[in-house]
Amino acid sequence: MRCLTPIALLLSSGLLAAQDRFAEKAAPFLQKYCYECHDEKESKGGIDVHTLTSTLGAYKQHQFLKSLASQVENRKMPPRDAEEHPSDDERKAVVSELRAVLKSLEEGNFPRNPGRPTVRRLNRNEYNLTVRELFGIDFQAGREFPEDGAGGEGFDNVGDSLFVQPSLLEKYLAASKKVIESVYASPERKSRVILMTPTEKLPPDKAARGVLTVQASLAFRRKVTDEELAPMLALFQKQLAAGASYEDALRLPLQSLLVHPSFLFRFEADQPGKTEWRISDFELASRLSYFLWASMPDRALFKLANDGKLSDPAVLRSEVLRMLADPKAESMSRFFAGQWLGFDELREVAEPDPKRYPTFTPGLRSAMYRESVDFFSNLIRANRPVLDLVAADYTFVNEELATHYGIAGVSGPQMRKVPLTDPNRGGIIGQASILTTTSMPLRTSPVKRGKWILNNLLGTPPPPPPPNAGVLPADDKSAAKLSFREQLEQHRKQPNCAGCHEKIDPLGFGLENFDAIGRWRSTDANGKPVDSMARLPGDITFSTPSELKKLLLESDELFLRNIARKMLAYALGRPLEYYDEPVIIDLVKKLRQNDLKTQSLILSIVESHPFQNRSAKR
Amino acid sequence: MSNLNLNKWLLPRRSFLRGAGATLALPFLESMRPLLAAGLGGSYPVRIGLLYMPNGVRADRWTPEGDGSRFKLSPILSPLEKHREDLLIFTGLQNKASFTGDGHYVKTAGWLTGTTITKTTGSDINANGISMDQIAAAQIGNSTKLPSLELGTEPITSGIDTNVNYTRLYGSHISWKTSTVPLPCEINPRVAFDRLFRAPSANAGKQASADKSVLDLVQSDAKRLQGKLGTADKQKLEQYLESIREVERRIEQEAATLGAGENLPAELLKQMDALDKRISKGMGKASREEELNSRPRFDHTEHCRIMTELMVLAFWSDSTRVASFMFGNDVTGRNFSFLDGVNGGHHEISHHSNDATKLAQYEKINRWHVEQYAGMLDRMSEIKEGDGTLLDHSMIAFGSPIRDGNAHDPKNVPIVVAGKANGGLRTGRHIVSDEGTPLCSLWMGLLDKAGVKTGKLGDATTPLRNLG
């Protein structure tokens, strides 16, 4: 084990003291009143309290400390039928301990850690875009690759959830051949790649070294080493000796770059002996480019990295702004926003019933997707406040989507920005992409929509339903006497369900005027008037999307924390840990200072400690 | 001295194949019997197929009446009537390690491993065991083109299930090569077809040696990198190296096959050609290139039939002996309204709340799956191998890791096996085991019949008795 530096010792002893406090003041309470149902074995409601034995343990479970505190405070827990009940003083004491821990977490009163992302394999999209950048190839060589699964906060750029199975490696090999063939098939592309040819003064091996030095450095996103060059040059020589022409002899070495671990993986070097360190300028260039472009750094970034200037704060800032102005920044919308908000699922997963919804054509599907992408891209490009996502008086449509929404005067297939006069439509909540992906094939789902608002938009997912929860009919068109909403209300009357559904469903009810593919409607599938009256706990009522949005705008902290959390996670490509919480708090603070401008959030993330540093321990 | 090139003159040269040219591992055809029999002790290799159905079954319509050889097929299983004598239906099996966690991911990802997967949104994905198909692939997959084949119909489900805090990728994988490497299903039939049966290029030999030099180069660099990495990164690179080795093995395998001559039975060539055309028709694209590059989104029934037919031809041509197929990912919301009387998505309907209309729809969806399975068995029983059929030399399991989807019930899981495994299985029976018998003991039994050695699997230490 590594020796601890005096500072680390000091910090960890501080932590130990805090640990003692929680262990002393809060843990006994939890053990006495909560373990019976919420221990390792039982963990009722998915909650297990038995790990809350120390401050560190509490930090790690911070997501539910808040609700734990309010459950105890409001006497919802322990439940009425529990054997033993705490006294009022006991309750008060433990609630204040729980909140103190949360406060110290948000303030960052503990040894900070920038984190340690697991080495990231390029995901499918990153591979395609990187190859395009590297060789100017416009076909998507990686289309045959399997979809990548998600990790951490739900993004497909997390190293831990990216694998290299034999079938994928086989596809990498095949794709590398295709790419190189296509490079060689076009004289223009070929001359872009084979930058030097032998002359009288320049022997073939020197020329090849020049070509491979440049191309390998680009492919590896850092300077290639002599050690790495040697086998490539040897392969070149071997081909040359076997009678291949200069250019042909370069084929295999170039192809090998696309199967090389330093191309397929984004390695970040360790610095032995240190607990944490600033990442190198080349590593910073890659973190930046994969965050903002989902692709490799361009030549300008490489040049700055090579000159050691990229980490200069002023340079870094202007580079970020330059990159955001580039069309490549659309990747943020497609991959970050698409996965965060879930409209990515519209491309493949959403399956409205074709008989019930004949106007849901492939063209409409793609226009819905484009609307959300263009909307988010506009937030970035025009540096709009992030709250435009909740409510906006504009959107992006083409003729087909405009007809779908009932907006007049739009013709032609191209997407364009239009002003909205209907306050119900604007913002992501009124976009057909979201309204469709949160519906069932044959009906809307107020539960799914409510859950989407809580989970995707606000970052406060409801707990899982009990195993025998039961569900509603798949189709809302029915001969049953009860309306669909009435059935849902009935379902909610069961005490098991009410606790959560009284928070989830009303949010969805407020959106019932949007049908399962996002059209406005005033009558439901059975021809009855839509009942969109919603009552949230605390007697908050609303009945239209526009009123719901007003409520969301009034208390925006949850939304802001959530967008900061999600974007930070996407930028870092790793699951977030408790030590990231103060970073998120800080991001929100800065966002507010900058009038909620989207670019300011992106800049703050790039300037944050975890984005620019790496630690020896996770 | 025996002449290894004997088959070159024993068999007619392969005729020109339209559309799909093909290089295959040596197929087991009549005229080759004497030659192959020497190597294989006179028997055909046992093939293992595993068909996964998501979201459980309607429990009261699944279990056959009666046991032993006197049983009556249940309504859901009735499409298998024709294959009654090829079947082993099991009642009473369970995977104890899947009782915890959540209602789906733990069950599905651990179906073939018999373990409890690690609960995670992504940082430490681990099945904590190797799936039984991969245990088989490691032991009996080395002489075929592919050690194993994984097929499916839906792309890996993205995102985290925040209800239960598992990454959804767990629900998209049943095959685990190691406890930390899940194998993705190929869902594009064109890609799968080409991978199995692709035409060798004119200069196949040269290509193989080019591939090899590329792989050698990156392999040595990867090994050098290994020393500089921390544990988690090292593990990722180890996966990469392992995959390189396996692709190299495949290239060698193909080169050897080419060297031995390309002899394919005419009937197999005909079937391959037919499948080739059927894929193009099903996918409905303008060109082969488009087929390769597109996400398959076509008639679900035809998609499933094509995928199972791929498995059949892969077995027949001995391109692989181990294969799995996922009809859908777990929790799939696939719209089954294409079935008469069904209105809605699969997962949704599986949560029937004992409502009669929903139960009826659930049963129809289950039955549809069994029909596809029956269709595959039809095909396998038509294909002659020696005195028997391909089905006689196989064991094709079909099932789901949960029973009643409404309750996510992991007890008494629905599972059927078809095929006699070269006489290893005594079929035509409904085997009722004591409640709580490990599903893994069935897996161990199947592995045993395929000649795969394993001392323990999940909660089982001995194979299920009374199979043979």
Image (tube, coloured by chain):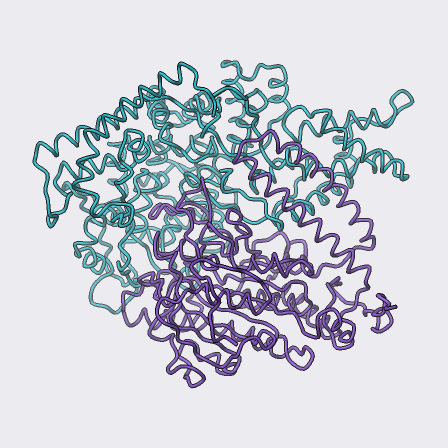
Chain colours: A cyan, B purple
Viewer-proximal residue among B216 and B310: B216
**In the image, is B320 to the left or to the right of B209?**
left
Question: Would you say residue A474 is visible in this rendering?
Answer: no
Viewer-proximal residue among B89 and A475: B89
User: At which x and y percent is residue B421?
Assistant: 58, 73
User: At which x and y percent is residue A579?
Assistant: 37, 27
Q: Residue at x 74, y 69 (%)?
A: B39
Image vertical order of residue A5 relative to residue B429, above or below: above
Q: Residue at x 45, y 57 (%)?
A: B458
Quadrant of the rendered image containing residue A319: top right
In the picture, which quadrant includes the C terminus of chain A?
top left
Viewer-proximal residue among B280 and B309: B309
Viewer-proximal residue among A363 and B451: B451
Image vertical order of residue A89 relative to residue A304, above or below: below
**In the image, is B299 to the left or to the right of B349?**
right
**In the image, is A330 to the left or to the right of A440?**
right
User: At which x and y percent is residue A41?
Assistant: 28, 49
Quadrant of the rendered image containing residue A600: top left
Question: Would you say residue A324 is visible in this rendering?
Answer: yes
Q: Residue at x 59, y 53 (%)?
A: B294
Image vertical order of residue A189 relative to residue B394, above or below: above
**In the image, is B44 to the left or to the right of B334?**
right
The number of numbered badges drawn on the structure is 0
Image vertical order of residue B123 relative to residue A532, above or below: above
